[in-house]
């Protein structure tokens, strides 16, 4: 307060300018004589001259007569109050009218005081001094308020920028995205003639347009290949989540609107609300264009930036469908003029950046010797970082993907403890790192590794590299007694032969690895390498006998063997439960696909045939029947209450549908049937069920019926 008083005193020492507006010449002369010793006085005799003076000068006070020709004092006061700057000038009315109504009207219009004529010198000077002093306090308070407001705005801007940088830091490929979108938005807003305040608001709105991504998992944002439907829904939710976060911020209009609607499309096919055309708020339409532009002109985890000409083509292609046609035209003009710069001003680039990846328990990860890029145990790249680097390397046009699995690793953990398991993982990881500095290795799961070798394009080279890994692992086994029961399986896929992107290559390498597991083999296996994945008729019969024996002995399928198809557990439990509660007969049918001429079958061929078998079974079953995959070349079906005489009719229908869907003759079908009946002892009450008196009969081998499907004639 003392500081303010000093400032006011300093202000009062300055010579103040007073504008007197009065049509009476004597009043002007009298007022000038009274005030000129202390103030600079300017006198005019009409409202017109007063406004002409105000256009070039700003007085500290106006003495305004009420009753004047042409433009009266009240009318002048109305005009002053409507002007952004003039309304700040204090006004004292001058009048000979002493009516209470007149005085009341003066104050209602915004006058600071009221002086009656004829002037009493001491009263007039004291009132002018007091009015100027109060105005000085007002001005000083306003200065301090403006200063505090600027400080708050600066803190807010820094906070907004920090939040924007934090969001962008979730993805290495989008750092600076929000800042660039903010600057492009300002440029486009100026281009279309928005007011300065609107331009500034769109800047802050664009900075925060992606704030909802703070709730999207990094693994989804950084996924280098196609998203699943669930993952895409998570991405789309960032619009509504962002709007919810920003809904209570009032400092910047439309800030939540920009977050919610910037992915709406002009044709109504956008999200989250499917708004169309001008239903979409203008600020969101504007941000939507520059957001897409920056996405196309930036490197992303799944592709490099697009060429400038392609970007222009995409923008024009989206005119009227994805984007507002008028805004697209204006934005294209900015591009043609070269008005958009990708470089962010230094003062904004220097804003503090909060990197959530560098915080670990309140301590910087670097200080703890940790890095979010690497798996803490093995020192290999974590899965996300490994997939990023491999995706980048695949752009060179050749390479080999290997899925490496540690066999019997679970048993090692169970018998020797997890410390022993960690040791084996570390030894395996060190081996992969030592093979070549150019190769890329990352940890995929608990006992799986992804390994990439650039430049390999032939199966002989891939097989030789896999053999090198296996030999090196055998050397490590001899040096570590704990590893004697551990071995490696390697599934392999080649770029250009088995696929053109990481997602497809990993999927096919995993299929090759799955083939090794199912066949009980170890070593390496290439996806496109030929192999007879069909079982013999005797093997198929043995599989069904084993399954029926398990059910008879009430074993859990997980305790005997591991089936990777999630539906198998449900079907198995259904059969067990049904057999305990019902007297209806059940038939277990195991369909097996195998080579028609005894030649080898590629995994890809078998998978296509299995999909056709699955569709043909689904078309043929009733509502009470169930089915599931049993192995990579087998399908299990459970028929409930079907007469034995009708079973072959059902089988023929399934087989005919299969050959119709598959359309080839290289993979044919066999089936084995186990007839499972209840023994009829008891009425199926709860007690009898609990004691196990109702169940599947012992099934002898002579109860298994085997058939071989005949292919239809061409």
Image (cartoon, rainbow, N blue to C red):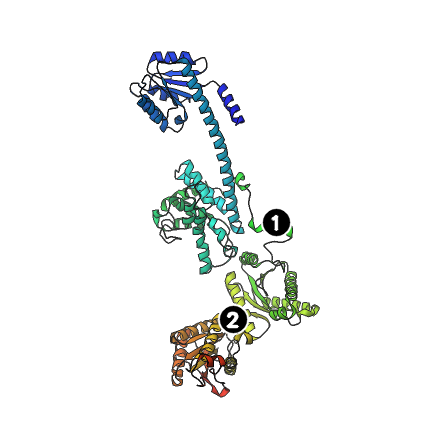
Q: Nearer the viewer, mark 2 or mark 1?
A: 1
On screen, residue 55 above or below 542? above
What is the crowding at mark 2: few (fewer than 14 residues within 10 Å), some, or many (at least 20)?
Answer: some
The residue singled out by tag 1 in the image is 364
- Mark 2, residue position: 564
- Which tag, 2 or 1, sits closer to the chain's start? 1
Residue 437, percent from left and from top: 64, 58
Please name the residue shown 35% across and 11% down the image: 26
Indicate the quadrant where residue 458 lies. Answer: bottom right
On residue 170, which mark appears? none
Does residue 464 appear to the left or right of 255 in the view shown?
right
Dot 1 crowding, Cα within 10 Å, few <14, some 14–19, many 20+: some
Percent position of residue 291, x then y:
45, 48
Residue situated furthest left in the rendering: 70
Which residue is found at the position 46% from the left and 43% from the top? 182
The residue positioned farthest toward the bottom in the image shown: 702
Number of numbered labels in the structure image? 2
Q: Is residue 445 above or below residue 308?
A: below
Depth order, front residue of 584/134: 134
Can you give x and y, in whole percent of width and height, for residue 674 in the image? 46, 83
Residue 474 image position (x, y, % from top left): 66, 69
Q: Is residue 381 above or below residue 601?
A: above
- SS for tag 1? strand
């Amino acid at each position: 307060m003392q500081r303010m008083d000093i400032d006011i005193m300093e202000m009062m020492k300055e010579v103040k300018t007073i504008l007197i507006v009065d049509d009476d010449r004597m009043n002007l002369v009298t007022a000038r004589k009274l005030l000129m010793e202390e103030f600079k006085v300017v006198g005019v005799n009409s409202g017109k001259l007063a406004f002409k003076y105000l256009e070039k000068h700003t007085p500290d006070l106006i003495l305004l007569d009420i009753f004047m020709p042409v433009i009266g004092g009240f009318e002048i006061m109305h005009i002053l109050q409507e002007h952004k700057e003039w309304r700040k000038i204090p006004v004292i009315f001058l009048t000979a009218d002493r009516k209470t109504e007149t005085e009341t009207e003066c104050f209602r219009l915004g006058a600071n005081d009221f002086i009656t004529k004829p002037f009493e010198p001491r009263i007039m000077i004291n009132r002018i001094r007091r009015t100027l002093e109060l105005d000085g306090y007002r001005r000083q308070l306003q200065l301090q308020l403006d200063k505090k407001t600027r400080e708050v705005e600066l803190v807010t801007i820094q906070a907004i920028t920090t939040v924007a940088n934090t969001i962008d830091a979730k993805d290495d490929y989008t750092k600076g995205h929000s800042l660039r979108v903010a600057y492009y938005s300002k440029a486009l807003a100026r281009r279309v003639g928005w007011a300065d305040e609107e331009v500034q608001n769109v800047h802050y709105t664009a900075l925060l347009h992606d704030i909802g991504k703070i709730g999207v998992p990094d693994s989804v944002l950084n996924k280098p290949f196609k998203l699943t439907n669930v993952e895409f829904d998570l991405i789309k939710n960032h619009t509504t989540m962002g709007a919810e976060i920003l809904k209570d911020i009032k400092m910047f209009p439309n800030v939540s609107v920009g977050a919610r609607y910037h992915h709406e499309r002009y044709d109504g096919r956008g999200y989250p609300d499917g708004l169309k055309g001008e239903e979409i708020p203008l600020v969101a339409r504007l941000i939507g264009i520059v957001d897409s532009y920056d996405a196309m002109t930036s490197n992303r985890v799944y592709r490099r930036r697009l060429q400038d000409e392609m970007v222009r083509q995409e923008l024009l292609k989206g005119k009227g469908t994805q984007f507002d046609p008028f805004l697209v035209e204006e934005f294209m003009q900015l591009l043609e003029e070269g008005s958009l710069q990708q470089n962010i001003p230094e003062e904004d680039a220097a804003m503090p950046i909060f990197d959530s990846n560098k915080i670990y328990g309140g301590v910087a990860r670097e200080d703890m010797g940790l890095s979010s890029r690497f798996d803490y145990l093995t020192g290999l790249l974590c899965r996300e970082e490994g997939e990023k680097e491999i995706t980048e390397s695949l752009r060179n046009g050749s390479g080999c993907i290997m899925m490496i699995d540690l066999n019997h690793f679970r048993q090692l953990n169970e018998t020797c403890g997890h410390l022993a398991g960690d040791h084996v993982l570390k030894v395996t990881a060190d081996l992969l790192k030592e093979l070549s500095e150019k190769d890329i290795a990352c940890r995929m799961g608990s006992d799986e590794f992804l390994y990439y070798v650039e430049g390999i394009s032939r199966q002989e080279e891939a097989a030789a590299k896999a053999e090198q890994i296996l030999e090196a692992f055998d050397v490590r086994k001899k040096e570590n007694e704990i590893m004697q029961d551990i071995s490696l399986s390697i599934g392999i896929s080649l770029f250009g032969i088995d696929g053109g992107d990481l997602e497809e290559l990993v999927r096919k390498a995993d299929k090759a690895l799955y083939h090794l597991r199912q066949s009980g083999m170890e070593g390496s296996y290439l996806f496109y390498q030929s192999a007879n994945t069909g079982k013999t008729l005797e093997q198929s019969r043995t599989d069904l006998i084993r399954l029926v024996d398990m059910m008879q002995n009430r074993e859990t399928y997980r305790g005997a063997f591991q089936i990777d198809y999630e539906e198998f557990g449900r079907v198995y439990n259904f059969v067990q439960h049904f057999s305990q509660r019902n007297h209806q007969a059940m038939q277990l049918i195991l369909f097996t696909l195998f080579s028609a001429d005894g030649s080898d079958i590629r995994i890809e061929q078998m998978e296509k045939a299995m999909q056709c078998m699955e569709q043909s079974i689904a078309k043929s079953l009733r509502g009470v029947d169930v089915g599931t995959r049993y192995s990579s070349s087998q399908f299990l079906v459970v028929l409930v209450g079907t007469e034995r005489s009708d079973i072959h009719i059902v089988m023929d229908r399934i087989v005919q549908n299969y050959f119709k869907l598959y359309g080839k003759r290289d993979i044919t079908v066999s089936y084995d049937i186990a007839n499972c009946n209840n023994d009829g002892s008891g009425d199926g009450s709860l007690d009898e069920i609990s004691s196990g008196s109702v169940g599947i009969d012992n099934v002898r081998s002579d109860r298994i019926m085997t058939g071989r499907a005949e292919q239809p004639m061409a």
